[in-house]
Amino acid sequence: MKSSALQIRTPEGIVFSQTLAGPATRFLAWLVDVLCVVAVMSILNMGLRLLEVIDPSIGVAIMTLTYFAVSIGYGIISEWAWRGQTIGKKLLRLRVVDAEGMRLQLDQIVTRNLLRFVDMLPAFYFVGGAACWFSRKCQRLGDLAANTIVIRMPLIAEPDLDQLLTGKFNSLRQHPHLAARLRQRISPGEAAAALQSLIRRDEFEPVARVELFEQLAAHFRAKVEFPAEALDGVADEQYIRNVVDVIYRAGGR
Amino acid sequence: MIIDLQRFIASERPGWTELETLLNRFEAEPNLRLDLSGVQRFHELYERAAADLAKLTTFSAEPETRRYLENLIARAYGEIHETREKQRRFAPLTWFFQTLPQTFRRHIRAFYFSLAITLAGCAFGGFATVFDPGSRHVTMPFGHDQLRPSERVKKEENQTRKLDGNKSSFSANLMTHNIKVSILTLALGMTWGIGTIIMLFYNGVALGAIAVDYIADGQTRFLLGWLMPHGVIEIPAILIAGQAGLMLALALVGWGKRVPLATRLRTVSKDLMTLVFGVALMLIWAGFIEAFLSQYHEPIIPYDAKIAFGLIELILLCAFLGKSGRKSAPGRKQKTESIVQ
């Protein structure tokens, strides 16, 4: 089955993954690029019309050559200048990279762009789309020849723990041995779920939010039983905050 | 066990930031070369970030920081482990007089194959014209099937002001059309060469059919005067595009080569780029000549002058592709010795 991520293992034994971009996202990026080429040509046309006043034949010739150069050169130049990105790819957070994680070379960019001529056949990138669909690494023929892949680059933002954990009194810390047991019993997946629920709390409907924190709190309360005075008057959401505080800030404030 | 994420990030962040800054510099300045201490520091930062990623993967569930580090490692990995020669500043003269002809000669067998397919097409087109005159509607492009060659020659020679005012646009159209056809011929190499072979054969058929039609009608001088000035560059350009397409196909098929597909394609990728740029240059020249010289016939330009011009171009092209960029004899000897060692 086709995977949406490409795993690369370095000689040091570290594995990192690249999220592959699907045909639909790539098609949208291509549409944006087509619009960019049309926009560039419209602007150039205005300037080139002045040449037609001097000599109509030279004006038409320069326009023909310019359109040809822009339509072919746009992908090559932008991907070379922006390390595997065009405007469309930037907008959709895509990037062309070497399939083995190496530095992207100019000849790879040229090859993948020139092979568009086959990928575009018979119309609307049918060949390229089909190749992409069946390829394990979601490569069109140009990518296959150039040994490149197109990856998705998710927004990378580090969690701001200071903002999430507002420095309120954490009753769980009054019982350090139980807090240590909690840290020990919680799996990485459970810790991430608690943290993510706090990070994304504003994205939920109010009722859904209450239900979510209720379920999470019940789950974590079952892990380690704290004395009643540590839980008195602590709402479910605050309880999860306290749990995250205990997990991610081992030393405390 | 969960590590203290905040303390971990706080202690390691300076190293990550330094690595990220260095990577940004590499991306902004492709010609940047670090000194030994710089390289050592870069390697140390990479190793440290890799170790941090390993720690995070094992001990922590924090996905954002892990993704950030994965991204950093992915970028640094390409810089550290890249073994291909770093692209130097582009030197157009060196590329034109050395790289292009050397690349052409390195893959001369693919060129001969491309030539053989075209000649086979020529033979087929020629025979078809002689033995099946009705086939001219299929084998001849550009409306050549509408008139007998002698009628066309008469018409052309009476047009003294042909293309006046349209030379530039005609030339531009020729250039762009021919370059597109050449790129397609190359790109069709991805169909295991079948598409490239069809393109070359079809070009040969059209060429052979037209040539035999003119020769049979006693218009050989006109044919040579019309085709040679631009054809001696244009036809080899298409053949070189076919050569590139066949190189791509050979890399794809990989007969007798025990290396992975990706490695085979990586090996020819740079040569394909060199050849396709060479083809584009040749077709730009051919486009100019076709619009500004080939379309003018006697009495404006004598056929002998056009044929002589074509011959000179052909000799120069052969000399360029065959001799340019060749190392002198001692140089070759030295290279052989170094390979033996």
Image (cartoon, helix red, strand yellow):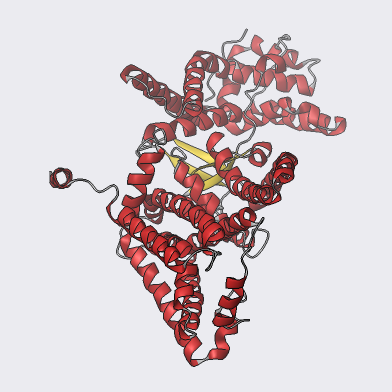
Count of numbered marks? 0
Q: Work out whether residue A221 or residue B30 is closer to the camera in this orientation and state it.
A: B30
| Residue B335 against residue A253 in the figure, above or below | below
- Give the percent coordinates (x, y) of residue B4: 55, 18
| Residue B53 against residue B38 in the figure, above or below | below
Instruction: Tell which residue pokes out farthest to the right in this image.
Output: A207
Residue B67 left/right relative to A14:
right
Report whether residue B252 is seen: no
| Residue B127 against residue A16 in the figure, above or below | below
The residue lying at 39 percent from left, 51 percent from top is: B271
- Give the percent coordinates (x, y) of residue B329: 15, 47
Q: Quadrant of the C terminus of chain A?
A: top right
Q: Quadrant of the N terminus of chain A?
A: bottom right
Q: Work out whether residue B150 or residue B51 is closer to the camera in this orientation and state it.
A: B150
Instruction: Tell which residue pokes out farthest to the bottom in this image.
Output: B131
Residue B232 left/right relative to B181:
left
Q: Work out whether residue B116 or residue B127 is closer to the camera in this orientation and state it.
A: B127
Instruction: Tell which residue pokes out farthest to the front in this image.
Output: B299
- Give the percent coordinates (x, y) of residue A205: 85, 33
Quadrant assignment, res B245: bottom left
Report whether residue B208 is seen: yes
Q: Work out whether residue A25 or residue B51 is closer to the camera in this orientation and state it.
A: A25
Quadrant assignment, res B153: bottom right
- Give the percent coordinates (x, y) of residue B268: 38, 53
The residue lying at 71 percent from left, 50 percent from top is: A56
